[in-house]
Amino acid sequence: MRTDEIQTLETDVLVVGAGAAGVAAAVTAARKGLNVTLVESGAMPGGELLTGMAIDGALNGLGEWVVGGFITELLQECQRLEGYIGPLNDWRLIHYVCYDPEIMKLAVANLLGRHGVRLLLHTFAYDVEHADGHVQSVHILNKQGRTRVIASLFIDASGDGDIAAMAGASYLSGDQGQYQPLSLMFRLANVDTDRLLDFLSHEPEHFALGESDAIRGGRTDQEIVKEVCKQGHPTVFLKGDGPLMANAIEAGEMYPTALIMIQPTSTQKREVCLNTTRVANVDATRTGELSAVLEPLSKQIETCTNFMRSRVPGFEHAVLSGLAQRIGIRETRRIACDEMLTQEDVLSARKRKDGIGKGSHHVDIHQDGIGQLRIPVEGGGSYDIPIGCLLPKGLENLAVAGRCLSADRPAHGSVRVMGPCMAMGQAVATAASLVLADKGQAAKPDFRSVDIEQLRQALAGDGAILDGTH
Ligand SMILES: Cc1cc2nc3c(=O)[nH]c(=O)nc-3n(C[C@H](O)[C@H](O)[C@H](O)COP(=O)(O)OP(=O)(O)OC[C@H]3O[C@@H](n4cnc5c(N)ncnc54)[C@H](O)[C@@H]3O)c2cc1C
């Protein structure tokens, strides 16, 4: 590896981070005919899309799709590859979209290739050259050495807002040392769904049910249990303060956690994803501290697998079939942008003329121990995300997309999920295509030069959902 000299790469748009937001941004910009480079520090594009969790926030609490466009093409690709389960009601708070994460790996790769995105894996963006509010280049490092990537426009989809922070943007991070937990997602196969649902029918007191009025719809717990069984998928949530888990936690058979969230990933493999491990209040941008939680999270997986096998009907013969390829990070930097999405915007399902995408997930802040704050959006509706939440203050040609957007902590707890992340990626990439439509016109391209109405029309034309839902 040569590190003594620096190479140069020119591109219309540089996207940093190939998670839900970055893949949506890169594919959208490339479809618009732009030359796009997507830089990813990991070994696979897809980020948290690859861990087995369902996509939240793409449908509202009434079951209406509120995110369209890019996500539709991605899910159609999963369906073509026979790894799509589809939207399900969790009969607790949300409707989410389930799929096989192994198939999602192929789907993401296919879309990036199909649309001609230049993908650089194993490549870390480590520095930014900027002056007078203008980003000139981002420096990347990989086995070929160091490269200065010169682009007209930059999209920071790094989750942590690395590029914006390096370009001098101010940001908030967690809440006075509190951060949502880091988790390692895992999957268990050979699960007997009928037995699990039978257990739910007979002992519903162990499960979280009908936590939002929109989902409950006036039903009793027993009526909700019937709906879960009718749906026929393992969409259940063992609660930390329910008798089964509380006793296990007290006996040291389980670690303290709010829920064991169980979602289907493959009916053929009888496989489910479990979202439950947690180590809270770690600043994940401190790499040493992040890495130190791998061991405790791995131990929790072993503990939880043993608990499920010995105590939860349907899991007697379950086998560990998959593990996320990295520690999951819920919360780090929230970059200061022209606007900040607020809890009030989220909970009141606020609609706006400058909305470029939607969110609908509840305010969802996982805490330490068995704590978790869950507040549903009013009426099971959706709220609009204004473009201003994606434009870092004082920077012209850099936009953020995904979980590093500007939001207060409760709003972030809602909008960080993957449905809105994809909507944000599609939106900033579409904005980029409008800015660059007149190539050569502007010496210093500026995301703020985009006419918001023109942007909304372009997004709607590409299938994005901006109006007409609750
Ligand atoms: C444990 C856990 C459970 C969750 N459960 C759900 C759920 O059930 N449903 C749901 O919808 N959402 C869920 N979320 C939230 C959601 O997954 C994330 O907030 C969302 O995926 C973030 O997408 P993103 O594109 O912003 O970031 P990411 O998916 O984190 O992608 C960012 C990418 O950027 C890369 N990167 C970072 N820095 C650099 C750099 N300097 N140079 C190059 N590359 C870089 C990373 O490797 C990564 O691939 C969960 C999150 C966690 C952690």
Image: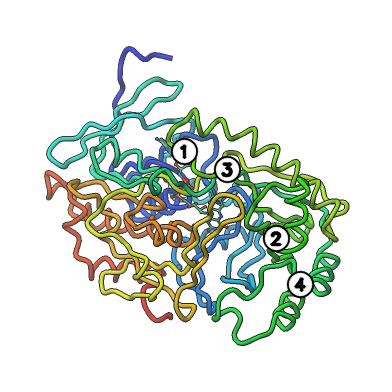
> Is the CB of mark 2 within 8 Å of ligand 1?
no
Q: Nearer the viewer, residue 141 or 362?
A: 362
Residue topped by disc 1: 284
Q: Nearer the viewer, residue 188 or 412?
A: 412
Mark 4 / mark 2, whichever is N-terminal = 4
The residues bearing labels 4 and 2 have C-alpha atoms spaced at a distance of: 19 Å
The residues bearing labels 2 and 1 have C-alpha atoms spaced at a distance of: 28 Å
| Residue drawn where x is 20% and y is 50% of the image | 393
Circle 1 sits in a helix, a strand or a loop, which is it? loop
> Is the CB of mark 1 within 8 Å of ligand 1?
no
| Residue drawn where x is 25% and y is 53% of the image | 337
Report the mark closest to the observer, 2 or 1: 1
The residues bearing labels 4 and 1 have C-alpha atoms spaced at a distance of: 36 Å
Circle 2 sits in a helix, a strand or a loop, which is it? strand
Circle 4 crowding by C-alpha within 10 Å: few under 14, some 14–19, many from 20? some
Report the mark closest to the observer, 4 or 1: 4
The disc labelled 4 sits on which kind of residue? Pro
Q: Residue furthest front?
A: 250
Circle 1 crowding by C-alpha within 10 Å: few under 14, some 14–19, many from 20? many
